[in-house]
Image: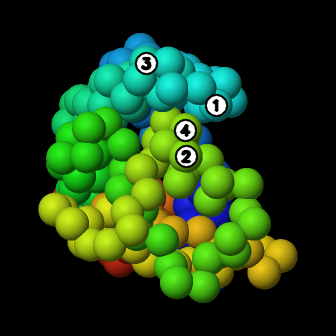
Amino acid sequence: MFLFFAVIAAALAIAVLIGGDVRRLSQLRIRHIEVLLAALATKVAVALLGTAHSPIAVTAARPLNVIGAILLLVVVWLNRRIPGALIFGVGLTLNLVVILAFGGRMPVLLPRDADPNSPILALLRGGLDPLHVALAHPQGLWFIGDIFNIPSIGGHSSLVSIGDLIMAAGVAWLIIRCSQPSPDLQPAYGSSPSP
């Protein structure tokens, strides 16, 4: 999650530095907002199930995790003309493929220097994380799972996938591109033609 916040902050800063106006982002129109809301509601349900820390909750969360990703992919397709949408969609597709390959959860290849006392690591190793499954060694499509270690605030770090990085690039492109003036709205400069 830190990755997306950092990318959004950086993209907003870049947009302003190159002369963009981030207020233009408010003009962005997303088609079929109801599908997006359904996708977000599904993701919230998965997160809530994750707080139960029980095998039953994990079993219920797996198909919901897939359904949420599919709904989000539908939203991306329906809004594919928005700058960055297709880039985001490629990353989301990679994540969906690997989630399906690992039974509804994102595989996480644990780093060797992982804190053995981490409560998150205990959930992963115990199989009680509804979104992730820990891999002791590379297997299957592990290379498109969460394998990149991204430092975050407070000395902690998070693992992200190549799909996450591509999705973040799509979000950055959307912010930067949509903050720029639209070419068809720019006034024509120069002398007007004589009658």
Which residue is painted at 16% across and 62% down in the image?
140
Circle 4: residue type: Leu
Viewer-nearest residue: 76 or 44: 44
Q: Which residue is mark 1?
A: 53
- The reply to whether residue 126 is visible in this rendering is yes
Question: Separation of disc 3 and disc 2 at Cα?
Answer: 17 Å
**Residue found at the far right of this picture:** 154
- Name the secondary structure under disc 4: loop
Which residue is painted at 42% across and 50% down in the image?
133
Question: Separation of disc 4 and disc 2 at Cα?
Answer: 5 Å
Circle 2: residue type: Gly
Q: Sort mark 2 into few (<14), some (14-19) or many (20+) by Cα contacts within 10 Å.
A: some
Q: Which residue is mark 3?
A: 60
x%, y% of residue 126? Answer: 55, 46
Q: Sort mark 3 into few (<14), some (14-19) or many (20+) by Cα contacts within 10 Å.
A: some
Which residue is painted at 64% across and 54% down in the image?
122
Question: Separation of disc 4 and disc 1 at Cα?
Answer: 5 Å
x%, y% of residue 68? Answer: 37, 28
Residue 126: which numbered mark, if any?
Answer: 2
Residue 128: which numbered mark, if any?
Answer: 4
Between disc 4 and disc 2, the foreground one is 2
- Name the secondary structure under disc 1: loop
Q: Compare marks 1 and 3 and give the one earlier in the sequence.
A: 1
Question: Separation of disc 1 and disc 2 at Cα?
Answer: 9 Å
Q: Compare marks 1 and 2 and give the one earlier in the sequence.
A: 1
x%, y% of residue 59? Answer: 41, 23
Between disc 1 and disc 3, the foreground one is 1
Viewer-nearest residue: 31 or 178: 31
**Please, is residue 112 above or below residue 36 in the view?**
below
Q: Check whether the beta carbons of the residues at disc 4 and disc 2 lie within 8 A of each other.
A: yes
Between disc 4 and disc 3, the foreground one is 4
Circle 3: residue type: Ala
